């Protein structure tokens, strides 16, 4: 069984694994750890249709696609194995409930995700280019002849496709010497003379997405990643979708639709009760969905000199300010380990020049951003002390953050509100007592729904003391929030920087305002 995300490596590796299990070694097999007698096995596709590249590979070699498995209970076997994943979030629906008892084997090339199993027969995870490359090495260790061109199934061709697809023709940072050796052996066996030209044909097929809706595009190569841990100790997951292409402008032209599809998929993920989407306490911990266009034309510059010389991943914006902040603040590295500065474009796209691999660059970069996201917000605050920081100030900010996020449905929303008004976590202006008291007062006076709507319009109201707010009428509080929202919508977005504390415009309602040296507006709204 292959993982979700119907890529060439996953589906081809499932077919190869079926062949391996039904064709045990017949001679000496030193170093081979697999079964030595034939095993009844059948390849399945996990949930999704093959992507265009995979469909092209299967058609090229005349191999029918495996059946699609919609739920783990649909398999006619008591146990199952996986290829190209060891992450339960990428296994079929229902797998999380039975994986510890029923998983028979794992053949993969990704980092371990903490999967707990009782007695798997075999776990073979190697840091090489593809799951198909792992299966090639296993066949060599087993002295098992690999069928190639002219055979009923061109297994050599499938192995070759997995390596060339995942390493972009041996040009990506994930390529190893083992992969290069495998390609040298497999290409003539598979009947492929020009491996780079053949890889380009695969990518051309993968770039042909006219038949797909934006929702389909988001899920063509999409993975639930994590768990990550934020500064407050909470764990969470992200969906990270990547589309490798040699025609990036086609995807850029659909940026708005793809961004909307990401948020629609996020709602589906966050409503899921699948154990793979849940935290230890049983609550859903999927926080956001991010989509990257990976321009891989530079991998083929030897074939077409008009292609660029540097790979590039581009984040396509959705309505999520939180997701954009993760990318802006990411700790991304190029293939040589050099730091990369994200470049934000006027339309909200963010270029990561030199980034190509989701596994090696995108996900680690995002994870590094989240680890310090709140502290980075804090570091950008213009303090009333003229920018000086006091001892223990970061901890004070985190304490305010913990109280502030209780006022919103989830941490993602809280971070988006924080990006509108960081005064709410400024120790010189606010306190946990203020946030807790004002939140309780708003719910009591306006009702939970109206209070929630108001806090989305004007998070800065949580800087007000409950004593000061008590003196204002409900109508004045609501009008102030509407005015703040109106000004916010008409104000240019300052990427990653603080917004002026817009609540200051409600001075007519009796608030006292003080202006700090930086020119930003701070509030003196009652006792801390």
Image (cartoon, helix red, strand yellow):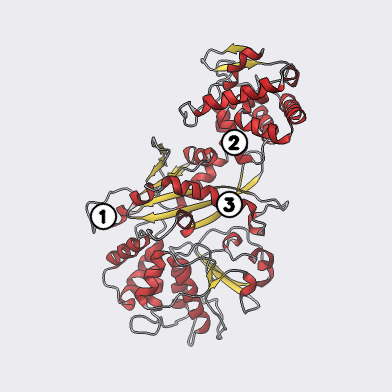
Residue at the disc numbered 2 = 415
Quarter residue 505 falls in:
top right
Disc 3 crowd, CA 10 A, few/some/many (<14, 14-19, 20+)? some
Which of 460/132 is in front?
A: 460
Mark identifier at residue 301: 1
Q: Secondary structure at mark 2?
A: helix
Q: Secondary structure at mark 3?
A: strand
Q: Is residue 447 left or right of residue 39?
A: right
Mark 1 to mark 3: distance in Å?
34 Å
Percent from the top left, x then y, of residue 29? Answer: 49, 81
Q: Mark 1 or mark 2, which has the lower sequence index? A: 1
Q: Mark 1 or mark 3, which has the lower sequence index? A: 3
Give the residue displayed 33% in from the left and 81% down from the top.
149
- 510 versus 437 height, above or below: above
Given the current orientation, which residue lies at the most extreme left position? Answer: 305
Give the residue displayed 36% in from the left and 58% down from the top.
207
Residue at the disc numbered 3 = 226
Mark 2 to mark 3: distance in Å?
19 Å
Q: Are marks 1 and 3 in contact (CB under 8 Å)?
A: no
Quadrant of image for the C terminus: top right
Work out whether residue 362 can be spotted: yes
Mark 1 to mark 2: distance in Å?
41 Å
Choose mark 1 or mark 2, whichever is in front. 2
Choose mark 2 or mark 3, whichever is in front. 2
Quadrant of image for the N terminus: bottom right
Disc 2 crowd, CA 10 A, few/some/many (<14, 14-19, 20+)? many
Give the residue displayed 51% in from the left and 15% down from the top.
519
Work out whether residue 341 can be spotted: no
Which of 392/400 is in front?
A: 400
């Amino acid at each position: 069984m292959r993982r979700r995300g119907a890529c060439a490596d996953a589906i081809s590796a499932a077919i190869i694994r079926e062949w391996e299990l039904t064709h045990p070694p017949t001679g000496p097999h030193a170093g081979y750890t697999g079964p030595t007698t034939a095993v009844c096995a059948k390849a399945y596709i996990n949930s999704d249709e093959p992507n265009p590249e995979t469909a092209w590979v299967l058609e090229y070699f005349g191999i029918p696609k495996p059946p699609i498995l919609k739920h783990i209970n649909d398999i006619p076997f008591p146990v199952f194995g996986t290829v190209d994943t060891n992450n339960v979030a990428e296994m079929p629906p229902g797998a999380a409930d039975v994986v510890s008892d029923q998983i028979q084997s794992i053949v993969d090339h990704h980092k371990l995700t903490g999967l707990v199993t009782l007695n798997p027969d075999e776990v073979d995870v190697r840091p090489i280019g593809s799951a198909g490359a792992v299966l090639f090495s296993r066949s060599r260790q087993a002295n098992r002849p690999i069928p190639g061109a002219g055979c009923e199934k061109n297994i050599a061709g499938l192995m070759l496709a997995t390596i060339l697809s995942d390493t972009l023709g041996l040009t990506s940072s994930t390529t190893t010497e083992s992969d290069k050796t495998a390609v040298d052996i497999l290409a003539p066996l598979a009947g492929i003379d020009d491996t780079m030209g053949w890889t380009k044909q695969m990518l051309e097929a993968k770039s042909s997405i006219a038949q797909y809706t934006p929702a389909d595009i988001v899920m063509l190569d999409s993975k639930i990643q994590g768990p990550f841990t934020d500064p407050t100790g909470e764990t969470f997951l992200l969906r990270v979708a990547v589309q490798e292409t040699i025609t990036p402008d086609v995807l850029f032209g659909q940026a708005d639709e793809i961004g909307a599809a990401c948020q629609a998929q996020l709602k589906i993920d966050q409503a899921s009760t699948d154990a793979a989407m849940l935290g230890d306490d049983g609550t859903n911990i999927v926080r956001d969905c991010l989509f990257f266009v990976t321009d891989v034309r530079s991998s083929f510059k030897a074939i077409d000199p008009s292609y660029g010389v540097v790979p590039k991943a581009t984040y396509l914006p959705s309505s999520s300010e939180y997701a954009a902040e993760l990318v802006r603040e990411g700790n991304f590295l190029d293939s040589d380990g050099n730091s990369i500065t994200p470049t934000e474009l006027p339309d909200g796209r963010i270029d990561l020049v030199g980034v190509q691999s989701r596994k090696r660059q995108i996900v680690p970069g995002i994870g590094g951003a989240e680890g310090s996201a709140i502290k980075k917000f804090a570091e950008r605050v213009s303090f009333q002390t003229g920018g000086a920081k006091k001892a223990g100030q970061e901890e004070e900010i985190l304490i305010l953050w913990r109280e502030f996020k209780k006022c919103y449905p989830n941490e993602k929303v809280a971070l988006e509100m924080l990006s509108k008004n960081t005064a709410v976590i400024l120790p010189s202006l606010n306190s946990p007592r203020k946030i807790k008291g004002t939140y309780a007062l708003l719910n009591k006076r306006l009702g939970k729904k109206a209070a929630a709507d108001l806090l989305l319009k004007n998070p800065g109201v949580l800087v007000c003391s409950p004593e000061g707010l008590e003196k204002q009428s409900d109508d004045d509080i609501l009008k102030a929030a509407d005015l703040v929202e109106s000004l916010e919508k008409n104000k240019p977005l300052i990427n990653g920087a603080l917004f002026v504390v817009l609540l200051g415009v409600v001075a007519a309602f009796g608030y006292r305002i003080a202006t700090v040296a930086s020119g930003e507006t701070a509030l003196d709204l009652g006792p801390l």
